[in-house]
């Protein structure tokens, strides 16, 4: 049984690795089950035992790679605590995105849903919990709108930057992101740091 599980996991990861490399040269919608099966030396039923379809595989591959890259960033960055909302740590993060540019171009091109669930709790605690403490009159629903405004503007700025092949310097993009924060978040973050 353990050997079966190990083999199943190996195939699961192999399909993601193949997909990740295919994404460098192939649009997600152009990747086929047949192509993946041939590259992994598996049959279609094995593929469908792992993933619903190619889009499911692409989604899971992107999510796994994003998590892996963010973990790698956190491990190698010089900062003990990342807020991603101060100029220095945001610049480091943007440099990291530019270094892995082709991957983030794909991820950002397909991002349309907000709030983004990945890292939701940590970012919500960082941004919204302090605002709610200072402004208890703001409902949870209103706070979520502020959070969505932050996530969507941050993501769309990154998407525009990636579409322009990361033409602006990271420090300029960091400034744009910080200046684009919803007023309530900006006021809370920067007034609390000044104290």
Image (cartoon, rainbow, N blue to C red):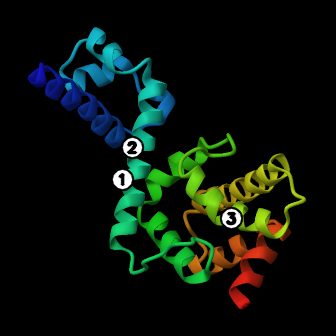
Residue extending farthest to the left is: 3
Q: Earlier in the sequence, mark 2 or mark 3?
A: 2
Q: Nearer the viewer, residue 134 or 43?
A: 134
Q: Residue at x 21, y 24 (%)?
A: 8
Q: For the residue labelled by badge 1, is the local secondary structure a helix, a strand or a loop?
A: helix
2 to 99, vertically: above or below: above
Q: Residue at x 45, y 54 (%)?
A: 102
Q: Quadrant of the C terminus?
A: bottom right
Q: Which residue is mark 3?
A: 127
Mark 2 Cα shell of 10 Å, populated few (<14), some (14-19), many (≥20): some
- Whether the residues at callouts 2 and 3 have beta carbons within 8 Å, the answer is no
Instruction: Verify CB contact (< 8 Å) between mark 2 and mark 1.
Output: yes
| Disc 1: which residue | 68
Q: Secondary structure at mark 3?
A: helix
Residue 161 horizontal/vertical position (percent): 62, 63
Give neighbour class at mark 1: few <14, some 14-19, many 20+ (Cα, 10 Å). Answer: few
Q: Quick check: can you spot residue 13?
A: yes
Left or right of 82? Residue 182 is right
Q: Residue at 72% of width from left, 53% of height from top? A: 152
x then y, percent, for residue 41: 18, 21
Could you give the CA–CA distance between mark 1 and mark 3, rounded to whole angstroms? 23 Å
Q: CA distance from mark 2 to mark 3?
A: 25 Å
Given the current orientation, which residue lies at the most extreme bottom position? 195
Circle 3 packing at 10 Å, graded few (<14), some (14-19), many (20+), is many
Residue 14: name its quadrant: top left
In this view, the residue farthest toward the right is 137
The residues bearing labels 2 and 1 have C-alpha atoms spaced at a distance of: 6 Å
């Amino acid at each position: 049984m353990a050997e079966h599980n190990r083999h199943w996991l190996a195939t699961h990861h192999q399909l993601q690795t193949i997909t990740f490399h295919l994404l460098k040269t192939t649009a997600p919608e152009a990747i086929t089950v047949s192509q993946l099966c041939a590259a992994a030396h598996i049959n279609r039923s094995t593929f469908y035992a792992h993933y619903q379809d190619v889009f499911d595989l692409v989604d899971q591959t992107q999510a796994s790679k994003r998590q892996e890259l963010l973990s790698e960033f956190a491990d190698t960055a010089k900062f003990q605590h990342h807020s991603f909302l101060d100029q220095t740590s945001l610049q480091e993060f943007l440099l990291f995105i530019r270094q892995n540019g082709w991957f983030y171009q794909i991820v950002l091109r397909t991002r349309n849903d907000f709030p983004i669930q990945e890292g939701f709790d940590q970012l919500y605690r960082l941004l919204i919990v302090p605002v709610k403490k200072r402004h208890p009159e703001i409902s949870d629903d209103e706070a979520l709108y502020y959070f969505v405004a932050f996530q969507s503007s941050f993501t769309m700025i990154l998407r525009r930057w990636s579409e322009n092949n990361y033409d602006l310097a990271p420090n300029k993009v960091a400034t744009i992101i910080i200046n684009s924060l919803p007023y309530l978040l900006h006021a809370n973050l920067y007034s609390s740091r000044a104290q």
